[in-house]
Image (cartoon, grey):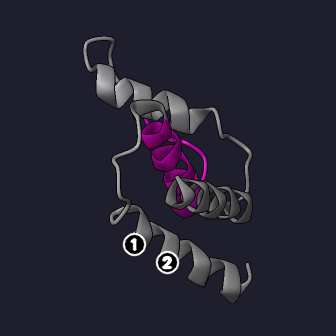
Amino acid sequence: MSDDLKARFETAVEEVQKLPAKPDNDTLLELYSLFKQATKGDASGKRPGMLDFVARAKFDAWAKLEGRTAEQAMQEYVDLVERLKQG
């Protein structure tokens, strides 16, 4: 993994907290899943139960990225944050 990509990813993680408007729920799930895939790899653990809607949605979004490399997820995260910053 290049140091440049890692630095841009870390900057994007900070910038997402400073966006002018809160992203919609689908975008928040995408940000979450890309972050988890970039930092933890493929989804692991037991899928949350049906009654825990939020945790289940987060897990499912992350699980959809299975097989994606950390570098790919970091780049997609950076690209998404750049699009959000532009409005």
- Nearest the viewer among 33 and 11 is 11
* Residue furthest front as drawn: 87
Report the magenta residues as a range: 27-46
Residue 33 coordinates in the image, percent (x, y) = 52, 44
Examine the structure image and report whether residue 53 is included in the region drawn in magenta. no
Determine whether label 2 and label 1 are within 8 Å by CB. yes
Distance of label 2 from label 1 (alpha carbons):
5 Å
Q: Which residue is mark 2?
A: 11
The residue nearer to you, when weighing 12 against 33, is 12
Whether the magenta-drawn stretch holds residue 43 is answered as yes
Most extreme residue toward the left is: 51
Q: Picture quarter containing residue 57?
A: top left
Q: In the image, 38: left or right of 72?
A: left
Which residue occupies the extreme bottom position in the image? Answer: 3
Residue denoted by label 1: 14
Q: Give the main secondary structure, helix, strand or loop, of the magenta stretch.
A: helix
**Position above or below: 45 against 14:** above
Between 18 and 60, the one nearer to me in the picture: 18
Residue 3 pos. (x, y %): 67, 88
- Left or right: where 19 falls relative to 44: left
| Residue 43, horizontal then vertical, whole percent | 54, 42
Q: Is residue 2 above or below residue 58?
A: below
Rendered residue at 58%/52% (across/down): 37
Determine the secondary structure under disc 1.
helix
Q: How dense is the environment of label 1, judged by Cα within 10 Å: few (below 14), some, or many (20 and up)? A: few
Tell me the amino acid under the disc marked 2. Thr
